[in-house]
Image: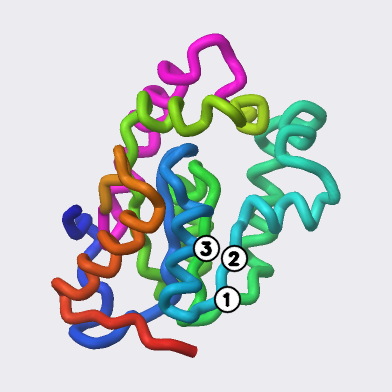
Amino acid sequence: MTPGAGGSAGGPGSLRGPLVLVGLSGAGKTAVGRLLARRIRWSFLDLDAEVESLSGRSIVDIFATDGERVFRDLEARVTKAASIDRTTVVSTGGGWMSRPELREMWPDAVCVWLRVEPACAVSRLARERSARPLLAGPDPEAELQKLLACRLPAYRLAEYSVTTDGLAPEEVVEAILAEFETDGIRPGTR
C-alpha cells in the first residue's frame, strides 16, 4: 500500500474529487467500491453496470456481437454522462485508466489502484470467467499478464495503490482508509 506517482490527493483533511477505483479484472473494484461507499456514506457508481443499462445488453453480449471497440465507445459515453460529484465512489472497467480521454473527463478524481496479481485474479474470477470477455480464452492468467503489462503505466498514475491479494473486500476498504489517514485525509459524508 503506497501512494502512486500521481501526486497528492488534495492536501490534509480533504479529497479534491470523487474516488475512482481502477485495476485489473478480479481486483475487487465493484465489491470494494460498494463497501467503501457504504462505509463513508457516499454514493456508488459501477461504470460496467452503467454500460449494460445504457445498451440494454450484458458486456459479454456487447463484446460477442459488436466487439471491444463498441464496448469502449459505450464506456466513454457513460463516463461522460455519469452523474458524479466529490462524494461518489466509482468502480471502473479494467481498461478505463489506460484511456487518457476518460481520465481527463474527471480531472479532480482521486484514483486508487487496486493491485492484484494475475494468478489471484484468475482464482477470484474462476466462477465468472464467461462473464469476462477478455478472459474467456484458454489461458486467462496469461491474458491478464498481457493486460497488466499494457496497463501498468496508466495504473501507476493513480494517487494511491493498495494490494488486494489475499484480502477480503472489507480488508481492502480498511487498507484504503488507512492510506487516506496516513495522508491526513478523512473522506467526509454527504
| Quadrant of the image occupied by residue 171 | bottom left
Tell me: residue 39, above or below residue 98.
Answer: below
What is the three-letter code of the residue carrying label 2?
Leu
- Asked whether disc 2 touches disc 1, contact meaning CB atoms under 8 Å apart, the reply is yes
| Quadrant of the image occupied by residue 180 | bottom left
What is the three-letter code of the residue carrying label 3?
Arg
Distance between the alpha carbons at the discs numbered 3 and 2: 8 Å
| Quadrant of the image occupied by residue 107 | bottom left
Q: Position of residue 105 (x, y in %)?
A: 52, 67
Residue at left offset 36%, top offset 68%: 110
Tag 1 residue? 84
Tell me which label, 2 or 1, sits earlier in the chain.
2
**Classed neighbour count for the residue bearing mark 3: other residues with Cα under 10 Å, few (<14), some (14–19), many (≥20):** many
Tag 3 residue? 34
Tell me: residue 24, above or below residue 99.
Answer: above
State which region is magenta. Answer: 134-161
**Classed neighbour count for the residue bearing mark 1: other residues with Cα under 10 Å, few (<14), some (14–19), many (≥20):** some
Tell me which label, 1 or 3, sits earlier in the chain.
3
